[in-house]
Image: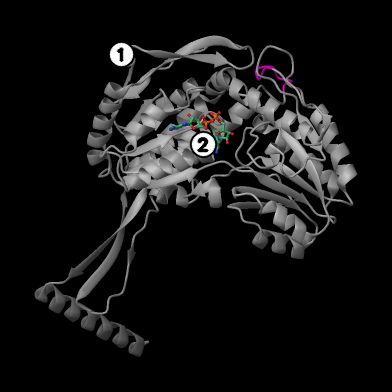
Amino acid sequence: MDTSYPNTQLYINGKWKDADAGETIDVINPAFENVIGEMAHARKADLDEALDAADKAFIKWKNVNPFERYKILRKAANILRDRSKEIARIMTIEHGKPFGESLAEVNLSADITDWLGEEARRSYGRLIPSRSSEIYQMVVKEPVGPVAGFSPWNFPINQAVRKIGGAVAAGCSIIIKGPEETPASCAELVRAYADAGVPDGVINLVFGIPSEISEYLIPHPVIRKISFTGSTAVGKLLASMAGLHMKLVTMELGGHAPAIIFDDANVDNAVQMIANNKFRNAGQVCVSPTRFLVHESLYDKFVDGFVKISESQVVGDGLNPDTTMGPLAHDRRLDAMEMFVSDAIDKGAKVKTGGKRKGNKGYFFEPTVLTDVPSDAKMMNEEPFGPLAPIVPFKNFDDVVEEANRLPYGLAAFAFTNSAKTAEKISSSIESGIVSINQPWMPVVEVPFGGVKDSGYGKELGSEGLEAYMQSKFITQKSSIWLFFIFNWITKRLNQFIWYTNFML
Ligand code: NAD
């Protein structure tokens, strides 16, 4: 497969351009650790240009009717589909994930674009009966204004599209800080929207030092809404900054999903589904199953099955068609995996398979299964965001619920059971934004996605994915005395007519 890789420019006010000061940041291929290209590095002058463009574009874009916006989004979705193989190739080179996963991500992003465009046509307001026949009361939905979006590297397109698509569909403009680890595929998403006819200034794409950009954009008076996906620690920092400046916020933060296997579950099915799900994107997924809580009666069988699936993973370059798990996306994750494993071993955990870096070139880490992991081990408390599977036995329902809800996270949870009663009970007991029973859930466009507790607030996807970029305005109007008489006269005539026709029939 072609291994060429494009450099990435900033996209501001409808133009692809180098940074004002000419600075760049290197991009590294995580499978080979070599520099493959560069991206433009935005500083304040570039951000000012983007702010000015977003401000001016918003005034026009908010008045473009939803049907026109929908048509542009539909076109963008089709462009993404047409270019999906080339975009997926670029994504795999800069991120490392297997080509098939990249391709699925581009196609899902096209579906998200379609969905948000369609939702724009359904951004209904409502009429509310008033206490006086002279008064009309209505609620209309309006775009919130220019948005600052911060999108991470684990899904270079799928995370950015929720923010860009939501903002554009709602009638907002957006400045998106793309992922510095994976800039080129994110830029291809923006290119698809631009080529579909999104007007200049509505989408602006920048890269740089994340803290420098957020500290400048969030307090800026032009920006009305912040949307961030990333770690809980950074999310709290940005949310507090946004709160200080009274900005609307969507925070899609970390998770630590419990995966519970009850004693009546089909253990073979459960292990097959959940273990393969664990190694998707090398475990760098906020909804990845993370703490495997298995009823003691099935424990040994589950561990054996999990080890088998882990050892069957083909770890390698994502462009190789046999690869099922690529490298970690950057060297920080490799250091983190080594830290999590050695900390668990120090505290008494046993490594059943994996546990170390694979080779000495590329950020590869072995699919890893651990048992006897105490609850004070770091991996049982902090989001590992990698291919680590600690498996822990439990005795009864109350104990497992207590363990599942022990952490401040609340993004996703999984449970396997053949009992409808247990399924209902666990769904209502778990503190989580998403609960998936008997299946390895993956994001779909029609349903809301987001967490509770420290996993953040606000939703992406579903109808909520558009709502997040709109605000309600209440309008009340007292009709003029003439309008009032005319309205009353029409209503009386209409009533007479209805009475008369009913009578005649
Ligand atoms: P990190 O916390 O440094 O960065 C996470 C993301 O936040 C990156 O995209 C980064 O560009 C951005 N970021 C960091 N500081 C920022 C700031 N001050 N202003 C604006 N954006 C900022 O960690 P990392 O090493 O890149 O990733 C590791 C951790 O991040 C993981 O353990 C995981 O918890 C979390 N993460 C979560 C998601 C998710 O989907 N929720 C995605 C990526 C990373």
Q: Quadrant of residue 443?
A: top right
Q: Decide: is 319 above or below 384.
A: above
Highlighted range, magenta: 317-323
From the viewer's perspective, tell me whether residue 111 is left or right of residue 488.
right
| Crowding at mark 1 (Cα within 10 Å: few <14, some 14-19, many 20+) | few
Q: Are marks 1 and 2 in contact (CB under 8 Å)?
A: no
Q: Residue at x 76, y 39 (%)?
A: 390
Q: Which secondary structure is most common in the magenta stretch?
A: loop
- The residue that mark 2 highlights is 230
- The residue that mark 1 highlights is 21
From the viewer's perspective, tell me whether residue 210 is left or right of residue 430.
left
The residue positioned farthest toward the bottom in the image shown = 503
Res. 221 visible in picture: yes
Q: Position of residue 307 (x, y in %)?
A: 84, 33
Q: Decide: is 210 above or below 18.
A: below
First along the sequence among labels 1 and 2: 1
| Crowding at mark 2 (Cα within 10 Å: few <14, some 14-19, many 20+) | many
Q: Position of residue 32 (x, y in %)?
A: 63, 12
- Nearest the camera: 421 or 338? 338
Image quadrant occupied by the C terminus: bottom left
Label 1 is placed on what type of residue?
A: Ala
Image quadrant occupied by the N terminus: top right
Res. 198 visible in picture: no
Residue 458's tag is none
- Nearest the camera: 2 or 78? 2
Q: Position of residue 466 (x, y in %)?
A: 42, 48
Q: Residue at x 80, y 42 (%)?
A: 271
Whole-angstrom CA distance, mark 1 to mark 2, is 28 Å
Helix, strand or loop under label 1: loop
